Image (cartoon, rainbow, N blue to C red):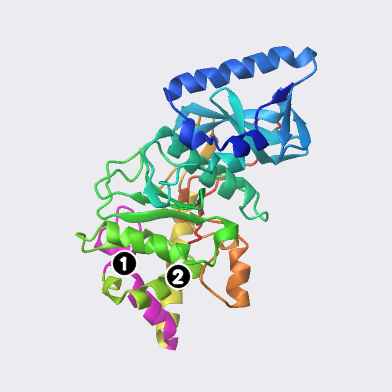
Amino acid sequence: MEAEGGGRAAAGRLYLVDTLAGDPEVLQVDAETYYEKLLKKSSSPPDVFLISGEEEVKLEDSSVCFVPLYRNNPTCKMLLLTDPKDKETVLAVYLNQRWWPVEDVVKTADPSRDGLISVQTFGERIVLFVLNYIIFGMLEGSSANDAFFLPHSATECAKILWRNGEAVAFYSVKMKGSLCDGTTSQCYLLPVLDTIFVRRKYRRGGLGMKMLHDFCQSFMAEDALGISCPISAAMYQVCQKFLQTYPEEQKRLWEVEAPGDWSQRVNIWLKIQMELSPSGKAEVENAQTNKSRQSDVDQMNKGVEYIPGIGKVAGDSTEKKDDTAAAGTLNSQSPEQEDLEQGAGNTQQCKGFRKRADPGGLVGDKATKKFRIIP
């Protein structure tokens, strides 16, 4: 028997985000019931899933697994189908009693979904999950570090950028007054741009600038806005172009560490100007070296936290380390910057990266901290 998927959604233009309705808990129970039936059918010929209407993939328990939909909430899970030939490639998501190809999950037939739209519905949360966790974290991420990333929280403030019926980018914000993490009572003292990602085929089209401008316009009443620290060199190039285009934002945009008090802020425009002068560049490099050494010491003193269904992750969500393999940029023309684009990343503090331990799971026990950015 062939599972629904592939060409049928495209032909009927009925996409998940347009049709998904009902209680998320009921949908999860449905997925768990389907999975149990799949296990019981192990002795009979398996059903198959068609990839692009051509190649068949057997629907077996060795090729499917559950992963958490939200960070710090392992009880809400998504059932994924992986490629038997490449366990790091996700082919489809099971929802609403059928398998949806990854590319169909991020499409819409609703013409009103155009431009930057706030994530509000459960269907849009699924799109955000697929963009962040699957497309960025697995399919378009850097092949050099084999990294998988934690999804956003269930209440994450985020916007998805829709273009020509497809979700092509997103960014998320830590709101002023929201908790920095689940282990402290500290709250963000200003709005902070925390994650930003543009799909590979849509980069170098000004979308990073568009989202940065939208972020600033969304908080006109605020005297200061933050971007999560540390910012990659590639993102600084985007910030430089943005602040040259919108000089009125030069005093408002800061690189910040949580929770973002004045001792944890560096004005981005000032830092760019210091980098442009020889004496200022040396001073900045000195400060960064000292800060890196202190961060290494702090890192050694951190434990790891075990989250059921996720694995071991680094225990502090407020400190972040740069991952140059993931740095990338948009709106640039130089060969060097184009090379940077080949990695995938986001500004998000990812509490850990997880390597596949076995065919049935996506998680492992290698704990680290990732901070990556692609505008």
Q: Is residue 302 magenta?
A: no
Q: Which residue is mark 1?
A: 253
Crowd rating for badge 2 (residues with CA inside 10 Å; few <14, some 14–19, many 20+): many
Q: Position of residue 29 (x, y in %)?
A: 51, 18
Tell which of 149 and 38 is nearer to you.
Answer: 38
Label 2, secondary structure: give it.
Answer: helix
Mark toward the viewer: 1 or 2: 2
Tell which of 340 and 309 is nearer to you.
Answer: 340
Crowd rating for badge 1 (residues with CA inside 10 Å; few <14, some 14–19, many 20+): many
Magenta part of the chain: 252-278
Relative to residue 249, is residue 181 depicted above or below?
above
Q: Quadrant of the N terminus?
A: top right
Q: Which mark is residue 160?
A: none
Is there any visible trace of residue 362 in the rendered image? Answer: no
Label 1, secondary structure: give it.
Answer: strand
Relative to residue 196, is residue 270 depicted above or below?
below
Q: Position of residue 80 (x, y in %)?
A: 61, 32
332 left or right of 7 in image: left
Q: Which mark is residue 238?
A: 2
Q: Residue furthest front?
A: 12
Q: What's the amino acid at mark 2?
A: Val
Q: CA distance from mark 1 to mark 2?
A: 13 Å
